Amino acid sequence: MLPTLTHIALHVPDLDTCVAFYRDYCAMQVIHRRAGKGSQIVWLAEPGKEHSFILVIMPGGQARQLASDDYSHFGFALESRAAVDQIAAKAAAAGCLIWPPRDEPYPVGYYCGVRDPAGNYVEFSYGQPLGPGSEAMPIP
């Protein structure tokens, strides 16, 4: 059997603000919350993907200070360019937009970048060969 990526676990400086961010921007839901080593551990998942991939967040981390040209990020696919624009407008109003919407050649597509409360970068894209509509796009 081959390995399967099931989760990413992060320590964050403020658990509740990170839970709210991933709920409000990424439509993730808390599927599990428990005490662990003197703190809370929270599992987040996209609806319907609770058994395939989760984000585990725990308090106690340091805020990340990524450079504006650092493209380390979590990637979320959206259903349209308009949805990317909506996320970008919401993030700009909240002061956490890092990459305004931009269009790049295939396979990158149309995307924007947002900083989560822990300093991680989160990309929202449309037109990549992953996510909504990807079945029609070959991966080069």
Image (cartoon, rainbow, N blue to C red):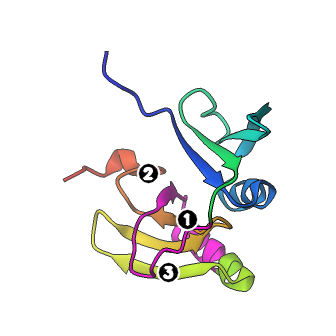
- Residue identified by numbered label 2: 133
The structure residue drawn at horizontal position 59% and vertical position 69%, both measured from the top left corner, is: 119
In magenta, the rendered stretch is 63-88
- What's the distance in space between the residues labelled 1 and 3, CA to CA? 13 Å
Q: Are there few (<14), some (14-19), or many (20+) residues within 10 Å of tag 3?
A: some
Which mark is first along the chain, 3 or 2? 3
14 or 7: nearer the viewer: 14
Question: Sequence order check: which comes first, mark 1 or mark 3?
Answer: 3
Please name which of the two marks, 2 or 3, marks the residue nearer to the observer.
3
Residue under the point 46% across and 62% down: 73
Quadrant location of residue 25? bottom right
Residue found at the very far front of the displayed protein: 38
Does residue 127 appear to the left or right of 53 in the view shown? left
Residue 75 sits inside the magenta stretch? yes
Q: CA distance from mark 2 to mark 3?
A: 23 Å
Query: Which of the two discs, 2 and 1, sits closer to the camera?
Result: 1
Amino acid identity at mark 3 = Trp
Residue drawn at (64%, 56%) of the image: 61
Q: Which residue is mark 3?
A: 99
Which one is closest to the eye, mark 1 or mark 3? 1
**Amino acid tagged 2:** Gly
Name the outermost residue toward the top: 1
- Residue drawn at (55%, 65%), measured in percent from left and top? 120
| x and y percentages locating residue 95 in the rendered image | 69, 84
Magenta stretch encompasses residue 81: yes
- The residue indicated by pointer 1 is 120
* Mark 2 and mark 1: Cα distance apart in space: 26 Å
Q: Amino acid at mark 1?
A: Asn
